[in-house]
Amino acid sequence: MNNPLALCHVDESFNASLLGNRGSQLHWFEDQEQLCQYLQEEYVDLLADTGELDEEQTEAARERFALIIEQSLSLPAMVDHLNDLSSGLRRIVWLGSLAELAELDDEFANAVRRYFWGEQDDNEDDPEAPIPESLWPDLLDLMDDFLAEGEYC
């Protein structure tokens, strides 16, 4: 199975508490180039809409995002910088590969695995155990339910 990149972000604006799924959105990308394009275009547009930015402010945000993406040495550093810029609007809660989601020791990834193993009625001894590659399709199938029902923020 391929190893796409996942981006999950949640609404931090005033209306977030009114949404059952926390205003979360999950996107999958085949490569980092596709991810960066999304962040500079659609994600900035989403922030601009939520923050009621005018055209000039939106373009300035696009330029700032492009600079951060270009200068970031790692995905976690990039997420930290982008979250600083979008504070109060949206927050990226996960950015990483499917393989990392299936095994990395991280708050969001651990929550995904707890939910996964709970739904599988398996691995009671270690509810945050890594998910083997053979079960990644099942993990992908459960992600929408996890975002609606899981504890991750």
Image (cartoon, helix red, strand yellow):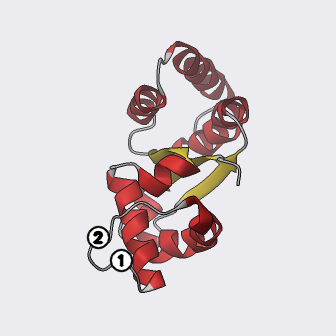
Q: Nearer the viewer, residue 66 or 134?
A: 134
Please provide percent x and percent y for residue 48.
Answer: 60, 39
Query: If the image is split into quadrants, where does the C terminus sit?
Result: bottom left
How many neighbours does mark 2 have within 10 angstroms: few (below 14), some (14-19), or many (20 or more)?
few
Q: Is residue 143 visible?
A: yes
Report the label total.
2
Q: Is residue 69 above or below residue 149?
A: above
Q: Given contact means CB atoms under 8 Å apart, are the residues at marks 1 and 2 in contact? A: yes
Residue sitting at x 59%, y 48%? 6
Please provide percent x and percent y for residue 44.
Answer: 62, 36
Q: Nearer the viewer, residue 57 or 118?
A: 118
Q: Is residue 80 above or below residue 147?
A: above
Please provide percent x and percent y for residue 133.
Answer: 58, 59
Query: If the image is split into quadrants, where does the N terminus sit?
Result: bottom right
Residue sitting at x 44%, y 30%? 85
Residue pointed to by mark 2: 126
The kind of residue on which mark 2 rests is: Asp
Q: Nearer the viewer, residue 110 or 47?
A: 110
Place residue 114 in its image quadrant: bottom left
Residue sitting at x 65%, y 30%? 36
Q: Is residue 114 left or right of residue 120?
A: left
Q: Could you tell me which secondary element the residue under label 1 belongs to?
A: loop
Residue pointed to by mark 1: 123
Place residue 56 in its image quadrant: top right
Q: Is residue 150 visible?
A: no
Q: Which mark is residue 4?
A: none
Q: What separation in Å lies between label 1 and label 2 (alpha carbons)? A: 5 Å
Q: Is residue 90 left or right of residue 47?
A: left
The kind of residue on which mark 1 rests is: Asn
Q: Could you tell me which secondary element the residue under label 2 belongs to?
A: loop
How many neighbours does mark 1 have within 10 angstroms: few (below 14), some (14-19), or many (20 or more)?
some
